[in-house]
Image (cartoon, grey):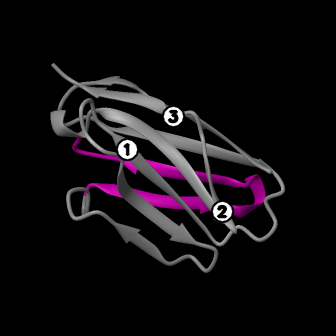
Amino acid sequence: QVQLVESGGGLVQPGGSLRLSCAASGSIFGITVMGWYRQAPGKERELVATITSGGTTNYADSVKGRFTISRDSAKNTVYLQMNNLKPEDTAVYYCNAFRDIHYWGKGTLVTVSS
């Protein structure tokens, strides 16, 4: 089992920044990809960004140039730096890890509003 705990969500004004963190614990050996997904009210969950164990990153077109995913292997933590936030970024953000199956955190709410 892999446990994922997100933190860093909150309320921010348009144009502002937030950094999300996801701490992984448990049977983390063999995780090949970690990432962030989000789900806005009334919408399906969508991919935001992923990072492989080799460091390759992938982003949704809607966040390219504004969001950056990174990881600290020593801390078993993945980060999502979000800059120039827009109201349409408002969603619950979920951390995901893949090792044979997908593991999910409980999510952290990001609200972008003036």
What amino acid does circle 2 point to? Ile
Residue at the image point whose x is 37% and y is 57% from the top = 47
Q: Residues within 10 Å of mark 2 (few under 14, many from 20)?
A: few
Which residue does the numbered mark 3 point to in the structure image? 107
The stretch of residues the image draws in magenta is 66-86
Amino acid type at image mark 1: Arg
Whether residue 86 appears in this view of the structure is: no
Which residue bears the numbered disc 1? 38
**Are the residues tagged 2 and 1 within 8 Å (C-beta)?**
no
At x 24%, y 62%, the residue is 65
Q: Is residue 57 above or below residue 49?
A: below
Q: Is residue 53 left or right of residue 108?
A: right
Can you give x and y, in whole percent of width and height, for residue 24 in the image? 72, 49
SS for tag 3?
A: loop
Q: Would residue 45 be found to the left or right of residue 54 on screen? A: left
Q: Are marks 3 and 2 in contact (CB under 8 Å)?
A: no
The magenta stretch spans residue 80:
yes
Residue 35 x %, y %: 51, 58
Q: Which residue is mark 2?
A: 101
